[in-house]
Image: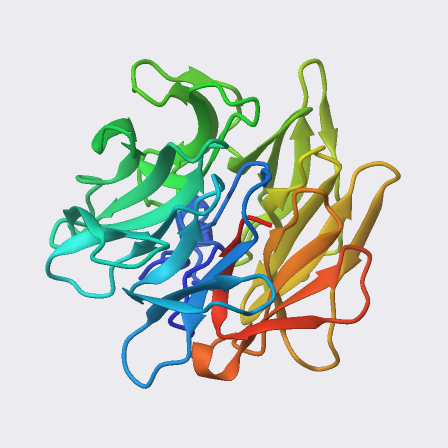
């Protein structure tokens, strides 16, 4: 398994506990992990920077560079790097050890990182930045066996450097309002049991009462777009099969199913990761057992496409604000960043352009 963090790869962070186990009790499929997706909101305009895990002989090391691969800077150890959209001032990363801080917040200029939470009590995964880069949503997963103690959603305010626990439970994605209000949506379950259900709710960055937005216990991985909330709806298939995921759009007045792709017994389906600024173009991951593939979804006119590169596994990492290009991890699936590259490709497919050697990328392009 890759050391990288990510929604589709089981990424002790970013994809480790299986959403299938949470919803069905089945462990036959390797799907998205609680809280591990970079379920970012709309990619806003910002400095063209990429954060990623660079090649290393030992621990995972976070780097930042320009989208042309220039001006590389080593920041320090970490996993699942998530760069801020406000000109790229910060890169958040999960800690790689089990003693000390659980989350590290690096300046893109280098130096010692700010430290948050306690890895002895919980793991911490950066999920999403607010459009102005002030707030960071972090999924916390308690280390206590058969307990949700320490699990929930926290928000870090980078102006006051305070943290607020805004929700409790097992978190399956979070995303901020693209209009810049101090509000975010998240999906949560009460436990990791196979009988647990999950719903999407909205909450203030300052905490307080959450507002339920879905019902039925089958909603996961929200991404907030201008026209509504893009999310996964799971469908139970019975037997030993894990639930099937399809992507939906919850608008102000209607609910629309965006995908109906074929999902085999050993796969789970599509998970939305990020959306263009106008909300029309989505990058998603098709996940399952030994599966993490890059797909694109265009709402109008409707077009759903898998991004391929011969026999090499291509994983999704992000989408540009204008929706013209997709950020990819290439060649590092279930292995180390040493064997991968970070590339971009036109949204509609075409020639891949290498950015840097490495993996597990995020950007503010």
Image position, residue 262 (x, y; %): 75, 56
Colour treatment of the image:
rainbow
Image position, residue 238 (x, y; %): 57, 50
- Residue 285 figure quarter: bottom right
> Is the residue 211 above or below the residue 27 in the image?
above
Q: Residue at x 57, y 53 (%)?
A: 48
Image position, residue 321 (x, y; %): 66, 42
Image position, residue 60 (x, y; %): 32, 72
> Is the residue 291 above or below the residue 300 in the image?
below
- Left or right for 276, reference 51: right
The mark tally for this picture is: 0
- Residue lying farthest to the right in this orientation: 301
Q: Residue at x 66, y 44 (%)?
A: 246
Answer whether residue 268 is visible to the viewer in this image: no
> Is the residue 93 above or below the residue 340 in the image?
above
Q: Considering depth in this image, is 359 or 47 the residue closer to the camera?
A: 47
- Residue 256 figure quarter: top right
Q: Considering depth in this image, is 254 or 127 the residue closer to the camera?
A: 127
Q: Give the quadrant of the N terminus.
A: bottom left
Q: Considering depth in this image, is 242 or 205 the residue closer to the camera?
A: 205
Answer whether residue 45 is visible to the viewer in this image: yes
Q: Residue at x 73, y 71 (%)?
A: 352
- Left or right for 297, reference 358: right
Q: Residue at x 43, y 15 (%)?
A: 211
- Left or right for 298, reference 59: right
- Residue 93 figure quarter: bottom left
Q: Considering depth in this image, is 329 or 269 the residue closer to the camera?
A: 329
């Amino acid at each position: 398994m890759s050391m990288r963090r990510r929604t589709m790869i089981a990424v002790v962070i970013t994809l480790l506990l299986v959403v299938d186990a949470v919803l069905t009790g089945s462990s036959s499929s390797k799907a998205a992990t609680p809280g591990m997706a970079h379920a970012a909101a709309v990619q806003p305009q910002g400095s063209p920077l990429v954060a990623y895990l660079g090649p290393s002989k030992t621990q995972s090391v976070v780097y930042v560079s320009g989208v042309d691969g220039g001006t590389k800077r080593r920041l320090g150890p970490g996993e699942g790097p998530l760069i801020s959209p406000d000109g790229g001032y910060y890169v958040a990363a999960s800690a790689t050890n089990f003693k000390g801080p659980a989350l590290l917040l690096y300046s893109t200029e280098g130096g010692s990182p700010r430290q948050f939470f306690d890895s002895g009590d919980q793991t911490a995964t950066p999920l999403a930045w607010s459009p102005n880069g002030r707030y960071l949503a972090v999924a916390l997963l308690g280390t206590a066996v058969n307990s949700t103690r320490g699990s929930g959603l926290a928000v870090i305010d980078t102006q006051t450097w305070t943290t607020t626990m805004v929700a409790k439970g097992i978190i399956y994605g979070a995303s901020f309002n693209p209009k810049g209000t101090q509000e975010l949506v998240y999906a949560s379950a009460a436990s990791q049991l196979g009988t647990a259900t999950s719903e999407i709710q909205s909450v203030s960055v300052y905490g307080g009462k959450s507002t339920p937005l879905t019902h039925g216990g089958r909603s996961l991985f929200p991404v907030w777009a201008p026209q509504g909330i893009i999310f996964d709806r799971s469908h139970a298939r019975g037997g030993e099969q894990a639930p099937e995921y399809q992507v939906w759009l919850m608008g102000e007045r209607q609910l629309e199913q965006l995908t109906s792709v074929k999902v085999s017994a050993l796969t789970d389906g599509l998970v939305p990761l990020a959306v263009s600024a106008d909300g029309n173009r989505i990058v998603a991951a098709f996940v399952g057992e030994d599966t993490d593939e890059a797909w694109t979804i265009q709402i109008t006119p409707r077009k759903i496409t898998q991004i391929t590169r011969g026999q090499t596994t291509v994983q999704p990492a992000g989408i540009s604000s204008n929706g013209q290009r997709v950020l990819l991890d290439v060649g590092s699936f279930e292995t180390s960043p040493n064997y991968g590259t970070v590339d971009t490709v036109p949204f509609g497919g075409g020639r891949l352009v290498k950015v840097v050697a490495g993996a597990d990328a995020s950007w503010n392009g």
